[in-house]
Image (cartoon, rainbow, N blue to C red):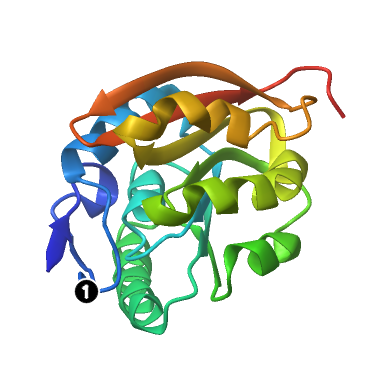
């Protein structure tokens, strides 16, 4: 299965995707979310958790992000991701652009502890929907640490689970993420959070 990028210096690029092990973010959903965040993308540092083929982070780079960190533990997905990123780097070089790329081939809980401490402007997590209730609370402390001031967190989920996502990011009742909005795209739900201001 392949995915096609819709904008930026990688417009038209087909991404290899191991469909048997990942559930790629639908192109229309990905484009709608990045259109919403477009003004934040120039120079942004992006964290793509459960990256799969890398479509989310690669489109961010294509649209102007300066750096993207990809977290993915599945071996088949990692191979596809590395090939996709090689093509991104080739296209960027041909256009005289410099992009920062980091790949962490580990489980999210372990990988996030190795992310740069300067923080990310946009954090995007698209985990297997079946484990989201268990995974998000385990990642909260690292998401709190890694979100830069005024950062945005995007969480994909089953649209039927939208109502419970805010509580999963605030297991102690002292969370750092304020829900900005939620939107359903068919069976896919997307939650946008902003990091609470004046929280260390």
Between 25 and 119, which is closer to the camera in this rendering?
Answer: 25
141 is higher (above) or lower (below) than 13:
above
Query: Which secondary structure, mark 1?
Result: loop
Q: What's the residue at 20%, 69% (across, down)?
A: 19
The answer to whether residue 196 is above or below residue 107 is above
Quarter of the image for the N terminus: give it: bottom left
Q: Quadrant where the C terminus lies?
A: top right
- The residue located at (39%, 45%) in the rendering is 60
Nearer to me, 109 or 84: 109
- Position of residue 25 in the picture relative to residue 52 (left or right): left
Question: At which x and y percent is residue 194?
Answer: 60, 23
The residue that disc 1 covers is: 20
Q: Position of residue 35 (x, y in %)?
A: 30, 27
Residue depicted at x 46% and y 59%: 50
In which quadrant of the rendered view does residue 171 lie?
top right
Direction from residue 196 to residue 28 in the image, left or right: left
User: Percent position (x, y) of residue 195?
Assistant: 67, 25
Residues packed near mark 1 inside 10 Å, few (<14), some (14 to 19) or many (20 plus): few
- Could you tell me if residue 119 is visible in this image? no
The residue drawn where x is 78% and y is 52% is: 117
Q: Position of residue 55 (x, y in %)?
A: 31, 55
Answer with left or right where residue 163 lies relative to residue 45.
left
């Amino acid at each position: 299965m392949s995915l096609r990028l819709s904008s930026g210096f990688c417009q038209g690029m087909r991404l290899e995707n191991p469909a048997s092990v990942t559930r790629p973010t639908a192109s229309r959903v990905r484009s709608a979310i990045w259109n919403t965040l477009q003004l934040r993308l120039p120079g942004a540092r992006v964290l793509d958790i459960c990256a799969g083929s890398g479509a989310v982070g690669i489109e961010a780079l294509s649209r102007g992000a300066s750096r993207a960190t990809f977290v993915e533990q599945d071996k088949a997905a990692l191979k596809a991701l590395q090939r996709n990123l090689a093509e991104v780097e080739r296209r960027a070089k041909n256009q005289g652009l410099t992009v920062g790329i980091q790949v962490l081939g580990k489980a999210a809980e372990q990988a996030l502890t190795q992310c740069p401490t300067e923080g990310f402007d946009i954090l995007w997590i698209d985990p297997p929907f079946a484990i989201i209730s268990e995974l998000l609370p385990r990642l909260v402390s690292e998401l709190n640490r890694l979100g830069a001031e005024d950062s945005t967190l995007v969480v994909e989920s089953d649209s039927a689970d939208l109502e419970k996502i805010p509580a999963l990011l605030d297991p102690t009742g002292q969370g750092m993420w304020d829900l900005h909005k939620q939107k359903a795209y068919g069976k896919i739900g997307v939650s946008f959070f902003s990091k609470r201001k004046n929280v260390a």
